[in-house]
Image (tube, rainbow, N blue to C red):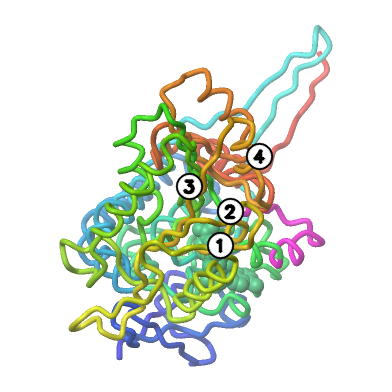
Amino acid sequence: MEKILNYINGELVPPASDMWLDNYNPAEGKVYNLIPDSDEKDIEKAVAAAKKAFPAWSELPTSERSDILLKIAEGIDREFESLAKAESDDNGKPLKLAKAVDIPRASSNIRFFATAILHFDSQAHQTDQQAINYTTRTPLGVVGCISPWNLPLYLFTWKIAPALAAGCTVVAKPSELTPMTAYLFSKICKEAGLPNGVLNVVHGLGGKAGQAIIEHPEVIAISFTGGTTTGKKIAATAAPMFKKLSLELGGKNPNIIFADADFDEAVSTSIHSSFSNQGEICLCGSRILVERSVYDRFVEEFVNRTRKLVVGDPTEEKTRVGALVSEAHMNKVLSYIELAKKEGGKVVTGGERVIVKGRCNAGYFVAPTIILGLDQQCRTNQEEIFGPVVTIMPFDKEEEVIEFANGTAYGLSATIWTENLKRAHRVAHQLKCGIVWVNCWLLRDLRTPFGGMKQSGVGREGGWEALRFFTEQKNICIKL
Ligand code: TXE
């Protein structure tokens, strides 16, 4: 069986312990390769390599760093087919989606930061006639990047691209559930001539390899995307060490539909924002809040459209909903559906595991599920399920829907559907979340800050924010 290898100091190497973990293809429910069960020894080697590589990489002219990163982006484009297949095989998502979103966006992430760094500048302030201050920004050093399984290569590159562009060297750990694209990416980096030790990719478990990155004293900043519970643990370890932290955590995002919305667009985009990537996107709108006068019409149309979504083999063109990432995650999602029923919810479509005939008959598929009749306070409407499960609730007034929308511990994103411009601005300003989409969803401009409020995280990624995160500021004051 194929063995995925770590990428340390420019070499593809097995873990020090020679221990391996099973990597499942969730659409087949079968192990299809092995990944390193790395531990602190591997992290130690990776940090030492990153430390050694830092002076030369950080002092390389920006244009040369940029050129190498652009070569890596070209490598992603060249390996497009194999990366898309690996992304789908590891995660269970439709191959079509990996081709349309994950891989092109991974390449865009690298290109964006490779070119953004060429325009990154610092500031100067004249203090009356007394002094001139100028502020420098220098790369931090060795940083840790830990990414999740839902958009594997996309989120992996979203972290490492700004770190490398800024001149940091990186120890990265992709999710143990979806390691394959990061492994292929290591090979692309080698081919592109990335100097040894600049990027080190160590595979393994979160509590072991991941925790060793967080605890390592030479790793001075952590960029993490994953669950809120993991984020808390990471913050608890890193905060007393005064590490710089960027945490992108979960969401329980409201999708607000006012009666004056463009109905057809609201319905079709809500299908995407509810069930794309099996609902395993932190930005999915899992709570649909609909103004009462259009509630019945919306529910009818939305349920009909949802029933037509094809759940099936991720490699088939017609498939819209693939497998969930793991058996454990499928069971978690199914247990939330049971909880919703206990809480008085009515499952109007879906609600169960789907057995797909043929190659995928042992896969972890769950039917797109719509639940009605729950109140705002229940656990189903408070906790992140991270699967193809949405609730729909009616509302009467603008103030009420703002209260509903803000009424969870999360604050990542929200969508507002209305043709009333003033209301769009008014409501958007009152929502306690980091990203608000008006009459659209997941439209991304990489220059904009990305991140959440409350338990959805701390810090902002994207654009200059990411480059600032990976640099240290110093102000120099000169008396005139
Ligand atoms: O993610 P984890 P899990 C949410 C979603 C999901 C839940 C749990 O609700 O059901 O989180 O998913 C690494 N030190 N999201 O458990 O554990 C881990 O190896 C250092 C939302 O799979 O947070 C992986 O690389 N690292 C989310 C990464 O953290 C640790 C996407 C994420 O895994 C670690 C994924 C530790 N102690 C899940 N423990 C989003 N916001 O997009 C784990 N890891």
Magenta range is 233-249
Please state which amino acid type lies under the numbered disc 1. Answer: Gly
Residue 80, position in %: x, y? 23, 59
In three-dimensional space, the C-alpha distance between marks 1 and 2, rounded to whole angstroms, equals 7 Å
Q: Which mark is residue 288?
A: 3
Q: Which of 231 and 437 is in front in this view?
A: 437
Q: Nearer the viewer, residue 190 or 150?
A: 150
Residue marked by disc 1: 226
Earlier along the polypeptide chain: callout 2 or callout 3? 2
Please state which amino acid type lies under the numbered disc 3. Answer: Ile
Residue at the image point whose x is 52% and y is 32% from the top: 120
Question: Which element is circle 2 on?
Answer: strand
User: Quadrant holding ligand 1?
Assistant: bottom right
In three-dimensional space, the C-alpha distance between marks 1 and 4, rounded to whole angstroms, equals 26 Å
Earlier along the polypeptide chain: callout 1 or callout 3? 1
Residue marked by disc 2: 248
Does mark 2 have its CB less than 8 Å from ligand 1? yes
Q: Is residue 344 visible?
A: yes
Between tags 4 and 2, which lies in front? 4
Between tags 1 and 3, which lies in front? 3
Please state which amino acid type lies under the numbered disc 2. Answer: Glu
Earlier along the polypeptide chain: callout 1 or callout 2? 1
Residue 171, relative to residue 377: is it above or below? below
In three-dimensional space, the C-alpha distance between marks 3 and 4, rounded to whole angstroms, equals 14 Å
Question: Which element is circle 1 on?
Answer: loop
Q: Do the residues labelled 1 and 2 touch (CB within 8 Å)?
A: yes
Earlier along the polypeptide chain: callout 4 or callout 2? 2
Question: Which element is circle 4 on?
Answer: helix
Does mark 1 have its CB less than 8 Å from ligand 1? yes
Q: Which mark is residue 403?
A: 4
